[in-house]
Amino acid sequence: MIGYGSKVIEGWAYAIAGSSFQRIRDLPGEGNPNVLVLRRGDQTEHLRGVAKLAMKIVDVFADAFPETSVNRDIVLAGALCHDIGKPFEFDLINRERWANDPSQAGEPALRHSVYGAHVCLTVGLPEEIAHIALGHSLEGQHIGLSTECYIVRHADHTWWHVAGALGLLKPVSLSGVGTMMRPRTLDDTHQK
Ligand SMILES: [Fe+2]
C-alpha cells in the first residue's frame, strides 16, 4: 500500500502490542463492547468493509462531481485506523480493572476513539488521521469534522446499520440502536 500504509501497520502493531490481543482477527466483531455484535466474523470484516465503503463513497461523488476534492490517502488510512483504539477498550484485562472500581480511572478510562487518536499521533500518523479516529465516533459530535472524517464516519455508521438490517448482528446487541430497523432472517444455506 502506498500513502500512509507503513504507518497504518505500525499503528496497529503498537495498539495490539499494548493489549492482550495477538492479532486484529482476535478482536471481536463489535461496535462497542456488547453493542452491535456480529453473529460471525471479527473486527477485520468491519475494517475492510468500512475502508471499501468509504472509497466507494469517494468514487461515486468524484465521478459525478469532478469539481469536488477529497484526499483519498487520508480517507483510506483513516478508515483503516478509525478503530485503532479498540485493542485498548476491548481488552478484557482493562475492562475487568475498570469494572472493579470505576471511581479510579473511569469505565472505560478512554474510549477507543480517544485512545485511537493517541495511537495515531504516537506512531507519527498525521493529525488528519488522528482526527478521524477521534471524530468517527460519539466524540465527533463535539467538534467540527474534516470532509475525510465525515466520509469515514458515515461509512462506519452505514456499515453497522446495514449489517443490522441484513440480520448480521445479534438482536440483543441492537437495543437503542436503529429503532426503524427490522432485521431480516439470514439464509442458513449460504453461511460460510
Ligand atoms: Fe468502526
Image: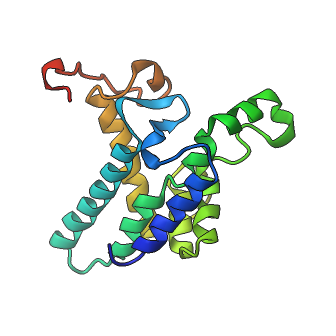
Of the pair 143 and 43, the residue shown nearer to us? 43
Return the x and y of residue 135 as percentages of the image width and height: 54, 58
Residue at the extreme front of the image, as rendered: 22
Kindly identify the residue that appears in the image at 23 percent across and 18 percent down: 185
Image check: 49 left or right of 113?
Answer: left
Residue at 80% x, 33% y: name it. 102
In this view, 139 is above or below 6: above
Residue 164 image-quadrant placement: top left
Q: Is residue 50 visible?
A: yes
Given residues 182 and 8, the one toward you in this image is 8
Is residue 169 found left or right of 128 in the rendered image?
A: left
Where does residue 84 sit, x and y in percent of width and height? 52, 55
Residue 71 locus on image (x, y percent)? 36, 76
Judge from the rendering whether residue 64 lies leftward or rightward of residue 184; answer left or right.
Answer: left
Position of the N terminus by quadrant: bottom left
In the image, 150 versus 30, the foreground residue is 30
Q: Is residue 2 above or below residue 42?
A: below
Which residue occupies 54% across, 76% down?
126
Splitting the image into 4 quarters, where does residue 167 fall? Answer: top left
What is the residue that sits farthest to the left in this orientation? 189
Total numbered labels placed on residues in the image: 0
Is residue 140 shown to the viewer in this render? Answer: no
**Quarter containing the C terminus:** top left
Which x, y percent locates residue 191? 19, 26
Which color scheme does this rendered protein use?
Answer: rainbow
Give the residue at x 48% y 57%. Answer: 82
Q: Residue furthest right?
A: 104
